[in-house]
Amino acid sequence: MKILVTGGAGFLGARLIEALLAPTANDLLPAGGTIVSADLAPCPVDDPRVVSHTGDVSDPAFIASLIDPSTTLVYHLAAVVSGQAEADFDLGMRVNFDATRTLLEACRQQAQTPRFVFASSLAVFGGPMPEQVPESLAPLPQSSYGAQKAMAELLINDYSRKGFVDGRVCRLPTISVRPGKPNAAASSFASGILREPLSGEASNCPVPLDTRLWLSSPQTVIDNLLHAARLDGQALGLRRTLNLPGISVRVSEMLDSLARVGGDAARARVGFEPDERVQRIVCSWPGDFDIERPLQLGFRVDADFDSVVKAHQRDMNR
Ligand SMILES: NC(=O)c1ccc[n+]([C@@H]2O[C@H](COP(=O)([O-])OP(=O)(O)OC[C@H]3O[C@@H](n4cnc5c(N)ncnc54)[C@H](O)[C@@H]3O)[C@@H](O)[C@H]2O)c1
């Protein structure tokens, strides 16, 4: 059997592949199984069970080469992130939407219906919203990235209703603290204002201090992506889309955590230069969700933001 991970060279994709290779994920990847990573870049995970295919998921011939009757599970993570999709509409449409449709069609051609886990985003929401977003709130994206994710979600729901795939749409919270370098996501600062000061570097906070963010640690998101694949499709019924659990934290509270974990010197490394482009996107996102259903379904949530920052600090020191 084969698991396909698109975006397998990316931040989450590579971590997900590592998690799938662990003995605790033997139910998803039994002995003899392989993982196919499909990405513009080679998969960094070095393991004989991982086959790395480099190519562009918006190329239908590349997609066709990735799926065969042994593909039982697809994780579709390859995407152009929010800032880039806003700056280049055509690229965002091609990678975030057209490629998703092509991939779903390739799955549809298989005799055995693959499970299909899609990484969507809270960026599908926008406009007038209650303080806490209920399970039933309709998407109203305020960015091209959010619109492309929302369109892909609708497709996955319909392909699941028709029995073409067994889909699970995971709307990921903003991930903090993301290790490495800043990226082109509008929410990049949500990691930068912790990561850089903890490494002794200056960082800028481009949004008001009272901005509320919906956050998850990388480890919790990976655990929840594994859980999504394990769920019985019957338990989801026609509601294939899930707002993954996160914690609701104001930027000021994130900086309080930084001071508690990293000290006042780390906190003092954060500057405040507003960025209208970032604010337009990030401040349109919801900062709190009703997560009763995902918790009932067994998804995990981080305990609090201090523990998230401490976990990042432990990883830094490894
Ligand atoms: N990190 C977050 O906070 C967050 C939040 C919500 C949703 N998501 C979603 O999770 C998924 C993974 O995010 P990430 O943080 O790992 O991003 P990432 O940018 O690290 O990884 C995305 C990967 O997709 C690959 N890719 C881009 N265009 C491609 C193309 N045309 N063909 C093949 N591969 C291509 C990139 O090379 C990259 O390795 C994405 O779908 C993203 O939209 C992430």
Image (cartoon, rainbow, N blue to C red):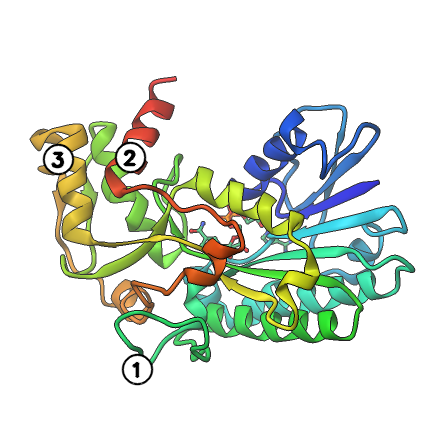
Q: Is ligand 1 less than 8 Å from the beta carbon at label 1?
A: no
At label 2, counting other C-alpha atoms closer than 10 Å, the crowd grade (few under 14, some 14-19, many 20 or more) is: some
Nearest the eye: 235 or 124: 235
Mark 3–mark 1 CB contact (< 8 Å): no
Amino acid on which the number 3 mark rests in the picture: Ala
Residue shown at 14% from the left, 60% from the top: 210
Task: Provide residue 12's location: percent of width, then percent of height.
Answer: 53, 43
Residue shown at 66% from the left, 46% from the top: 39
Work out whether mark 2 precedes mark 3 in sequence or the reverse, and give the earlier one.
3
Mark 2–mark 3 CB contact (< 8 Å): no
Mark 1–mark 2 CB contact (< 8 Å): no
Q: Is ligand 1 less than 8 Å from the beta carbon at label 3?
A: no
At label 1, counting other C-alpha atoms closer than 10 Å, the crowd grade (few under 14, some 14-19, many 20 or more) is: few
* 69 w.r.t. 150: above or below: above
* 96 w.r.t. 28: above or below: below
Residue shown at 26% from the left, 72% from the top: 131
Quadrant containing the N terminus is: top right
Q: Quadrant of residue 152?
A: bottom right
* 305 w.r.t. 110: above or below: above
Residue annotated with mark 1: 128
Task: Provide residue 17's location: percent of width, then percent of height.
Answer: 63, 36
Task: Provide residue 285's location: percent of width, then percent of height.
Answer: 33, 68
Q: Is residue 199 left or right of residue 45?
A: left
Residue shown at 73% from the left, 46% from the top: 4
Amino acid on which the number 1 mark rests in the picture: Pro
* 9 w.r.t. 243: above or below: above
Residue annotated with mark 3: 259
How far is disc 1 from disc 2 in space, using C-alphas? 32 Å
